Image: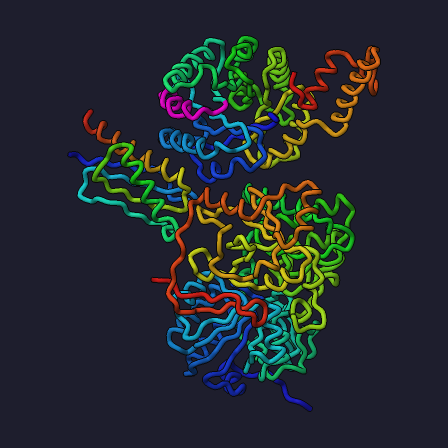
Amino acid sequence: MNRSLLFIPGNAPKMLNNCDVFGADGLILDLEDSVPFEEKDAARILVRNALGNLRDAECELTVRVNSKDTEYFNDDIREIVPMKPAALVVPKVSTTEDVQQYDNAISEIERLNGIAEGTIKFYALIETALSILHLEEIVAHDRIAGIILGTGDLGIDLHIKRTKEEHEFLYVRSKMVAAARAYGKRCYDTPHLLVHDLEDLEKQVKIAVNLGFSGKAAIHPKQIPYINEYFSPTEEEIKRAQAILDSLEEAKSNGKAAKMVDGIIVDNANIRAAKEILGIKE
Amino acid sequence: MRSSKVVGSLEEVIKLTGLRDGMTISFHHAFRNGDYVLNLVTQKIAEMGFHDIRINATGVYDIHKPVIELMKKHIITGLETNYMMGGFGKGITEGACDTPVIFRSHGGRDAALFEGDTHVDVAFIAASTCDEMGNCNGTHGPSAFGALAYAKIDALKADKVVIVTDNLVPYPTIGISIPETLVDYVVQVDCIGDPNGIMSGPLSATADPVTTVISKMATDVIEATGLLKEGFAFQTGGGKPSVMVAKFLKEKMLKGGIQGSYIMGGVGKSHVDLLNSGCFRTIMDVQSFDLEGIKSVRENPADQEISIYQYASPSAKSCVSDGLDVTVVGATQIDTDFNINVHTNSFGYIIGGSGGHNDICMGAKVALAVAPLVRSRVPIVVDKVVTVSTPGEYVDILVTQRGVAVNPRRPELKEQLIDNGIKVKSIEELKEMAYSISGVPAPLVTTDIPVAYVNFRKDQLVSTIYKPIL
Amino acid sequence: MEKMYGSAGFFASDDAQVTVEIGAEKKGIEIKSKVSKLFNAQIEGAVKDILDKFNIKDAYVLIEDRGALDYVLRARIEAAVIRALASRKEGDEV
């Protein structure tokens, strides 16, 4: 399951101790924006140890490192990469060159630690105007497992005047979904910053689902149940998916072509969608 | 013609009661950490030169810490209680009292008095409204605190009964919780207590994320027991997890159109909410936890004040706690036998007491304990609790943020939960998990000097609390 | 040998403030913790392990702990040691 990605401040032992019980499918242990400059060194060691402590957790473990343009980046990856998190969340990615530079840096550490190059994947944070123009090449890169929208920084870069409905991000969101889906990568909607407005969160989650996102990031555990619920297929969808595959089986055994189920044509696209809903890998 | 029972001063009334060295005085704890009466009376007793006085108080709180000093001077030499807050508990644990404290549950203390196992010479009963003949209540007046449930047995069984009030009203008062028939004297003081001191625990329902996870799971478990249906009878306390469970339960009950029969008090905002939203028909009320609770028992006929005798006494022909479907309780520790500790922390210091814990765990069809697996490195699930408060045979389920365990004594309950989608682990598994997170704790070593005896309910000795090595 | 000093972590719930002094007269491990009755051995063990890892003898380590789990404590000790060692480097540059 890859519906929810929960940010955890990297210098907060209390949160790190229990971050795996909130039902999030993935965790982002953060060394970047949630950690003040004077604590970067301590946080990186704490997160390194936390990764060891969480090794049996059932969720995907990722770490947001500081940008490669900062003085913290090299120490971050030197400590974190050997712990083999599933992915690094790389900030301020604007072009494929940025991804390649991250790739080169991580490859070296993987080499030095006897880890097969390319093992650790990237989630690229889409938070600059330039990144919107380069989405296709960013998602095409092998290291990229997915992209995460960050409307906080992106809104500033685009000079957007934010409204509650967030219509102003519609183009950005749709383009991200198109790019990610074209290359079979995941796309996560932005974390909902009004933490205590759960009614608005629910609205935004439904919009993200409708737009085609594969999941949504979160900054507070109480957001997780809403994200997981709406990004999970409904009972009805599961039944219909099963019905589509059943009719395909039935048609095969009768030597006929499958036709329609519930008004849905049983064609390749719908068969693929049905398998995805049922979690069947190709 | 008859004369008023009102006496001019505390000193005078103490003389009139015939109090002597060696006697026992009693108090109720409806004011919790806002009570003034226990201190007023004991300070006066000290001034008047008494020694060797025993206290029987249904609960003692940090506000009563001056009594620790009186104990060191041998003015107070014994204490029987159902609950002891941590600041007071430190003094007792470190040996301030000449004789070991005797702990009972609320129902057990009531039964002990009823049956004459223990005796009160003079009861000092705080009441927020009282008339000159002693008809009184706790629900009306500027210092209203809620039901006068705990003191009803004292009024019945004590040799002398003194009502202490700060609100004397013309005879007869309206709202009679304790009738004049049982009262010897009435004395007026400036203030009997601070209703704001009643509120302990959370004022708002926002809990930390881990408590939310535990409370949600506990509510799902309650639903999975199959008991959450029309006529559901429920009890939960005033702490953070309890408040959250009440909130989640309300959502489920409203969604399912379920109306429960009763909730048992102590009563705070979240319980009142359950009543007012139609989720339950009535509250059986013995205590208020906050101002909302006080208002409710005063103004809503469906929020009914009852006695502790009816609430939880094993001596009664029947009692409310025996009709419970589910109770949600806390624990400072729970061991692999499901024994629960609510008297001491993991270091052997007294920080609580049964209160109603014993009675409701025994009475309920399902007793569900909620706790985090580890609290600031201290494991909650352990091999053996430091103090047994409620024996494991009365505890059915443990819910933590890392798993749910069912007492092996209840295999059918375990099946029921599994069939309804709850993942169940063994209690040993949870203990191993706790120890792997915290480390294996060194065993606690104490002296062999007893500072308290813990009775399950009335008189079944389940634990002795020893003085730590200081 | 010049005095080196480093401190990391916070005296907050579930965390520990660790102070490391190398080259001072004070030596040894001082533990101030609510849970020392239960976990003193483990806390001392964590300090010794980290000091060994950095090959430091003769240090004074003060742990002011509020229930930090082992992995947190070790991270804080390590960060304090690294900051202490860095403080010497800074001294040299002047």
The image quarter containing residue A67 is top left
The magenta stretch spans residue A109: no
- From the top left corner, tell me how far across and down residue B423 is, in percent: 63, 41
Residue shown at 74%/15% (left/top)?
A270
The magenta stretch spans residue A74: yes
In the foreground, B288 or B467:
B467
Q: Which quarter shows the C terminus of chain A?
A: top right
Given the current orientation, which residue lies at the most extreme left position?
C1
- From the top left corner, tell me how far across and down residue B33 is, in percent: 51, 63
Q: Is residue B441 left or right of residue A262?
A: left
In the foreground, A93 or B337:
B337
Residue B174 seen: yes
Q: Is residue B166 left or right of residue B326?
A: left
- From the top left corner, tell me how far across and down residue B11 is, in percent: 49, 82
The image quarter containing residue B417 is top right
- From the top left corner, tell me how far across and down residue B391 is, in percent: 57, 61
Tell me the chief SS of the magenta region: helix
Number of callouts: 0
Q: Which quarter shows the N terminus of chain A?
A: top right
Residue shown at 77%/55% (left/top)?
B231
Q: Is residue C29 above or below residue B19?
A: above
Q: How is the image coloured?
A: rainbow
Q: Which residues are magenta?
A: A71-86
Residue B193 seen: no
